[in-house]
Image (cartoon, rainbow, N blue to C red):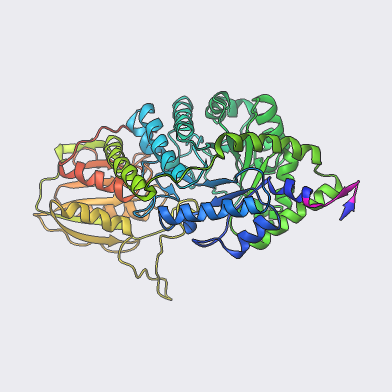
Amino acid sequence: MTGLGLTVTEEVKRRVGQHFVLGFHGYDVSDDIKTLIQKYYIGNVILMKRNVQSAAQTKRLVDALQTLAREAGQEQPMMIGIDQENGLVSAFSSPTAGTTFPGAMALGATGSVELAESIAKASADELSMVGINWVYGPVADVNTDSRNPVIGVRSFGDDPEKVAKYVVATARGHAAGGVASCGKHFPGHGDTHVDSHLALPVIRKTHAELAAQELVPFRALVDARVPSIMTGHMALPLVTGDESPASLAGEVTRGLLRGEMGYEGVVVTDCLEMDAVADVKQGGCGIEEGAVRALEAGADVVMICHTFARQVGAVKEVYEALWQGRITLQALEESEVRVRKMKEVFGKQQSDEGDWGMKFMEMKMQNEDVSRKAYLQSTTVVWNGAGVIPLKVDTVVLFTPEPESVNRAVDSGDGVLKTSDGVVRNTAAPYYLSLAKSLEKSVNVRHVVYAAGQEPAAVGNDEGVIFVMRNADLRAWQIEYLDKLVENIQVPLVLLSSCGPYDLGHGAGERFADWTGYVATYEFTAEALDAAAGVILGTDHCHGKLPVVVG
């Protein structure tokens, strides 16, 4: 391919490859990722939860990927990235891999910026030990819209100044652990009730309004010289003049982030396979064209997480854009300098001296203790009407909502099994089963999975009730069930928000405050729910405070 004096040589391919971060499927090196690294010289890889089976397996996988890159002639190690925000978005956390640490809003509830930094350091230490050197976090979005379906508890809160302190502390912790942070989702995904995985959010804010709210945490990250920032797929027509995604808009990347804010680090896009970009039926430009537009707009690295054919198509589309002059080699060279600088600092390989497996397990045991204490510090008793907490009964009836997907960033339906008629077959989500087990350490438990349209289960006069909600402000059927339940019971009742703390907002909780207890965990990880169980039954004490305003 020639044109405008350009031939797509191996050298050109090597340069283009440094501007992509791509994902693949499986626990081992697949043929697809081999092709991408060896033939297209892809210089950066994202690991998803589907790639992580255990810490040892992840380390073998990362080592194999780096070996492929060296054999392909790459001068620097690859950046191996992962979505490890902690809390609900934790691709490396599992009993066989990394520690489950509290997520952003839970840490915001602790009131301790120092704790957030130490948790980030502990998490980065584990990632670094398996060779992961790039973490897609912290989330710098300010959660100003309680209806937000994709950010929510992934944010530290709704106060931009407080969020700024937490994201900078998190970035410091990552750096101390030898891992590059990536603040996201620039210029801010917190004030929307549309999920960019599914459609394009449109945020009609002026530049001045963004500067007063969304940009505050990002300015703090820029001032702190965070190694990378991720651009998001939301439209800002009052800033860009049209409804192009911010990730593909030069007014955002070159104009606002680089020019006005003076950011000199690496800019990477959110995954281009999200429907806000990928779905042409909804007005998206498509993945391949999206890759070109992102680089035209000033991004250094474009992310495509899932589909091999789309990844190859996007790389070839960039070759074509070079041939057409839409992208210049000079622009790629300027971007490459930024990528190389990040790799010089964070791309160093870990040594394998000593008993690696034993060292990792010792680290994890220490981190799990730190995490448990942090979860207790975050758990929040919102109110305790009539002193219901601690719950003093012999038998607890635990009501948990039937499983539903939160969003594509968090889950894809929790493995829900349904019949051909749409009836849920599995009895409860695994994290709620773990809550029941935590409670069973101290009391008898009768577990009821409730669903929309059902008549409430009967409760004995000598029993107590723990009623669990998950985003009930967005799923009214949960409150409808609760209202029916309380018509016929006069027993101690504890309400538990297991995700966003907005379940009983907008006046919904006023009729409960005087006679029930109410606890917020900010996430439905087993660890968060275990801490809540201890607090509700009085075996543990908590210190959390709401980090958001719940109207």
Vertical relation: 529 (above or below) 166: below
Asked where in the image residue 249 lies, by quadrant, the reply is top right
From the viewer's side, name the closer residue of 172 and 506: 172
* Residue 547 visible, this angle: no
Asked where in the image residue 400 lies, by quadrant, the reply is bottom left
Query: In the rendered structure, does residue 298 fall within the stretch colored magenta?
Result: no
Q: In the shown orientation, is residue 333 left or right of residue 428?
A: right
Residue name at image x 70 percent, y 26 percent:
259
Q: In the shown orientation, is residue 339 left or right of residue 540?
A: right
The C terminus - image quarter: top left
Residue 46, percent across and down?
A: 56, 50
From the viewer's side, name the closer residue of 457 and 403: 403
Residue 264, percent across and down?
A: 65, 29
Residue 421, percent across and down?
A: 42, 75
Task: Give the magenta range.
Answer: 3-10
The N terminus - image quarter: bottom right
* Residue 421 visible, this angle: yes
